[in-house]
Image: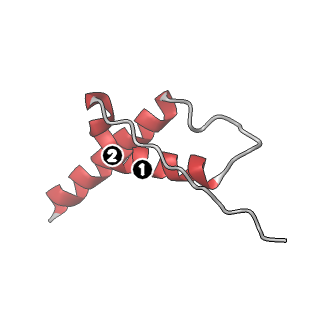
Amino acid sequence: MRIGAVLIVIWLVLGVIAAYERGYFSDSEDASCAEAGTVIVTTLAGPLNWMGVNPKVNCDVPEPSR
């Protein structure tokens, strides 16, 4: 059980490192749900990021009707 928890933590740490390398934690004033989603899925992808996985999230919010 402990080995599994350690592996999950290592997996997520590697995902955070990959997100950092891609510049997703830059001080951006126009943060959006798409940026947050991309950071989350990049973190969850973990080491797969270095094997060619490049997850992106697109949050299209519809415009309100008049």
Q: How packed is label 1: few (under 14 Cα within 10 Å), some, or many (20 or more)?
A: some
Q: Position of residue 14 (x, y in %)?
A: 35, 39
Tally of numbered discs: 2
Q: Are marks 2 and 1 in contact (CB under 8 Å)?
A: yes
Q: Nearer the viewer, residue 15 or 61?
A: 61
- Quick check: 60 above or below 45? below
Left or right position of 28 against 16: right
How far is disc 2 from disc 1 in space, using C-alphas? 6 Å
Q: What secondary structure is found at the residue carrying circle 2?
A: helix
**Quarter-of-image position of residue 1:** bottom left
Q: Position of residue 49 (x, y in %)?
A: 33, 35
Residue tagged 2: 45
Residue sticking out furthest to the bottom: 66
Q: Position of residue 43 (x, y in %)?
A: 41, 46
Residue tagged 1: 41
Identify the residue shown where x is 50% and y is 46%. Answer: 39
Q: For the C terminus, which image quadrant?
A: bottom right
Q: How packed is label 2: few (under 14 Cα within 10 Å), some, or many (20 or more)?
A: many
